[in-house]
Amino acid sequence: MADRHAWTAAPSAAQRARSVSAVASSCAVTAESGREELIAAHTVTEDGRMLLRPPADSVLFTAAICTPRSEPCAVLEFADVAPVPMRSRIRARLWLAGRLVREDDRLAFEPTRVALRRSNGVAVVDLQEYATAEPDPLAEAEARLLTHLADAHPDAVERLAGLVDPDCLQGAVRVRPLAVDRHGLTLRVERAGDHGDARLTFHQPAEDVAQLTERMQVLLAQAGRAACPRALQRQRTDDEW
């Protein structure tokens, strides 16, 4: 059966936005009545609505009551932070403008505008695409996977760096795993005065951690072949056939 997800080199802006909001442990909420930091107080529904549980005395309840329903009354901000220590750990920022509606002891947030800032700029995300997009299936496990890769397998990171364009590695002092998703692995190449990111795309999307393991093994095998002299590569090819 064909993969129900189309093969792409990286997640779309809508998919990335849904992943950021789904796994973030906190968010900042700004309304006319003030700004509040909510920790472990939001959930995301399947259609992208936010359910917030601020403290009982939060001014956000006032904002939900006093702002006309036809107008956005709040902005939610999420920061996507790389789990592995490195330079410039903020990978993305997500902003959602919309309406707050009180539902008993919680607030329902209905987005009317979504914007995602990544290293390549800011993208305004179509609301319908955001509503129908799914978080990356590896998003919940990403922090654990990257931390394990960096701490327990630095040799593997070094080998994977062999697949990066040599121009990107010029002057490199350290390579760290920055991000992983169903479509590929991103490495952060740190140099003395700056840094750059390199994307290693999987040959096929990974739907779970087991499939991710297989995709990583394929990349490591490619890295091993790239490190071999050409004559040895030819010999291995002959042996395989």
Image (cartoon, grey):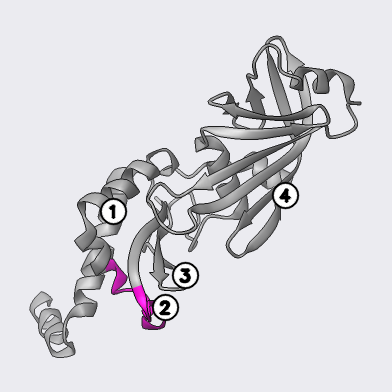
Q: Earlier in the sequence, mark 3 or mark 2?
A: 2
Q: Nearer the viewer, residue 82 or 5?
A: 82
Q: What range is drawn magenta here?
A: 160-172
Residue at image coords 37%, 79%: 171
Q: Amino acid at mark 2?
A: Cys
Of callouts 3 and 1, which one flags the residue occurring earlier in the amino acid sequence? Answer: 1
Determine contact: label 4, label 1, CB under 8 Å: no
| Residue 233 spot, x, y in % from top left | 16, 83
Check residue 114 for magenta coloring.
no
Q: Which mark is residue 168?
A: 2
Mark sitting earlier along the chain (2/4)? 4
Q: Amino acid at mark 3?
A: Gly
- Label 3 neighbourhood size at 10 Å, few (<14), some (14-19), many (20+)? some
Work out how far the residue at label 4 is from the one at label 1, CA to CA, in angstroms: 35 Å
Which element carries disc 4, helix, strand or loop? loop
The answer to whether mark 3 and mark 2 are in CB contact below 8 A is: yes
Answer with left or right where residue 211 lies relative to residue 20: left
- Which element is circle 2 on? helix
Q: Helix or strand or loop: what does disc 3 sit on? A: strand
